[in-house]
Image (cartoon, rainbow, N blue to C red):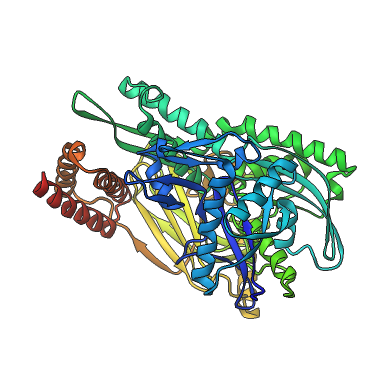
Amino acid sequence: MSDLIAGIDLGTTNSEIAAFTGGQVRVLGPGDTRMLPSCVGFSAAGELLVGEAARNQQALYPERTVRSIKRQMGSEEKVRVGSKDFLPQEISALILRELAEWAHCALGERPQKAVITVPAYFSDAQRNATREAGALAGLEVVRILNEPTAASLAYGYGDGSRHTVLIYDLGGGTFDVSVVTVEGDITEVLASHGNNRLGGDDFDDLLAERLAAEFEKQRGVDVREGHPAAKARLWWAAEEAKKKLSFEPYVKIREEALVTRLFRPLHLEVEISRDEYEAMIRPLVESTLDSVSKALQDSGKKPGDMDAILLVGGSTRTPLVSSLLMEATGLEPRQDVHPDLAVALGAGVMASRLAGRAVDRVLVDVSPYSFGVSYLGMRDGYPYSHCYKPIIRRNTPLPLTRTEPYLTSHSHQTEVDVHVYQGDDEDALKNILVGDFRIEGLTSMEDANEILCRMRLDLDGILEVAAVEKRTGKSKHIRIDNALRAKSAEEIAAGRKRIQELYETRGEMVDDAWETAEDLEEDVVDAGARVIEMPARVGAAGDAGLESLLERSRRLLAKMHAEDREEAIDLHEKIETAMASRDAAALQEASGALKELLFFVEGGS
């Protein structure tokens, strides 16, 4: 009989399955996919849909789709999906069955046993419902594992020594915080607190409400009443916007033909800033700090007694979470294991140990260094042009992309020098300069001009840096190869020499330094190596032709089948994004695809 035991995170928004393979614990899935949306539905033909397929139809057919079923586990209240009624554990069983198929495809055998995780505060009824879901899926549930325990295993707190950690788990639909001690194979939960009705879904609800109010303001139509498909589309758009705002300072939302009035499609277009979004969700995030305080109090511990704060759950990517936790505890939270996968990986570690495998911890690729840019700020009460704060922080899982906004420092400034550093010191000159470049031809304006700095670091250690003028999309990109390679003694000596030279001129102010959009203690951008200049505009004739193509497509939206309409709307967004960013290659690809789609639509109408 096979000794395969899988570890499963049965999540509110997404679910994952992990197992021991290739000498380590891995999260399994088809292709690059590792997360299965916790959605179940039925197509118009009655075909069962699980995961991405169900999630994709939710916007058009919300009555045939169910999501976030974890919030109802343990109740006997049935949910209707299309024309059928299901208990919550039956919906969960369908998700578990799909995960078992993923493992079968990846490993060549279907797991018969599993460790399934649950929130620490789950009641007996909820735990029994989870066991029943496993049995319905054909799995013997050998262990119900608390999610904070799983997270501690993923982070490697099982090395024999004693650790006390606070695990902050903010997922899609549930929140819990636990104080645990880990010593060897024994993990003891000292105290837990949480809210099984709080998570990223609630953040989405607030954003969706903002979008609905904006659409009513723009178009005079309230989609919250009598427009279920449009309401579902806004919720979906809100979810995508939330994800982007974890890494970008702004997100532009455009929903084509959200509703039709008098045969005329009405669109929504709005820009949301991270500041506005975080102001919306701040009361919810602050409410989690009450749970942190109660968990610490119940455990008899203080923040200073913690060895670490571990972040778990996709919603912890929101920068506001880390900043408020740091303010409240004085500890910088760790997120060096993928927050969406940490619980599944920990379940995989436990499952592997139960199967007789020796597994200490999960191996992850993280950035060993911080990267950021210098900027004009205040230091010791005086303006200083070499202030520094990381954009990419060390111990962040790879690959990753981060974007921060900056402002030019004086009126009519048309160029900026960007200097990229590696290190953590607040004085850029004490860090290692890894590159620099200049962006020229900025718009001359009386007020400060906003520049977006984007850093992307991949698994191969290639760092790409882009500086983009927000109002026009004009940008410059640079690429730094081997950014994660340790510097040689000669390189460090050369860097020290350059620092000394810069220190000798540190009293001089430079006109093209940047200050951040938030305050004078944020960072600017640097880089170095090859510089690629992006075209400033596509061209007036090309723009006119594209607008004509888009207008032609919009007129046909009402005649299209649902799948064609979705594809057309997606291509509209890609074309507009490419136009805004002056990405000629992406523009050509998207416009060509739209022309091909319209050819078939018009031919068949």
Task: Judge from the rendering whether residue 589 lies leftward or rightward of residue 370; answer left or right.
Answer: left
Please state which of residues 96 and 474 is positioned toward the viewer in this rendering.
Answer: 96
Please state which of residues 378 and 477 is positioned toward the viewer in this rendering.
Answer: 477
Q: Which quarter of the picture shows residue 345?
A: bottom right
Residue 161 in view (yes/no): yes
The residue that appears at 16% across and 45% down in the rendered structure is 549
Quarter of the image containing the C terminus? top left
Does residue 32 lie above or below 72 as drawn?
below
Task: Judge from the rendering whether residue 76 lies leftward or rightward of residue 256; answer left or right.
Answer: right
Please state which of residues 375 and 565 is positioned toward the viewer in this rendering.
Answer: 565
Residue 402 in view (yes/no): no
Q: Residue 562, position in %: x, y?
A: 27, 43
Quarter of the image containing the N terminus? bottom right
Please state which of residues 425 and 461 is positioned toward the viewer in this rendering.
Answer: 461
How many numbered callouts?
0
Residue with the most extreme right position? 300
The residue that appears at 64% across and 42% down in the rendered structure is 321
Q: Residue 202, position in %: x, y?
A: 56, 34
Q: Residue 165, position in %: x, y?
A: 80, 53
The residue that appears at 58% across and 75% down in the rendered structure is 485
Task: Judge from the rendering whether residue 73 lies leftward or rightward of residue 254; answer left or right.
Answer: right
Q: Residue 574, position in %: x, y?
A: 30, 49
Does residue 313 lie above or below 556 as drawn?
below
Task: Judge from the rendering whether residue 168 lies leftward or rightward of residue 190; answer left or right.
Answer: left
Q: Which quarter of the picture shows residue 288?
A: top right
The residue that appears at 18% across and 27% down in the rendered structure is 263
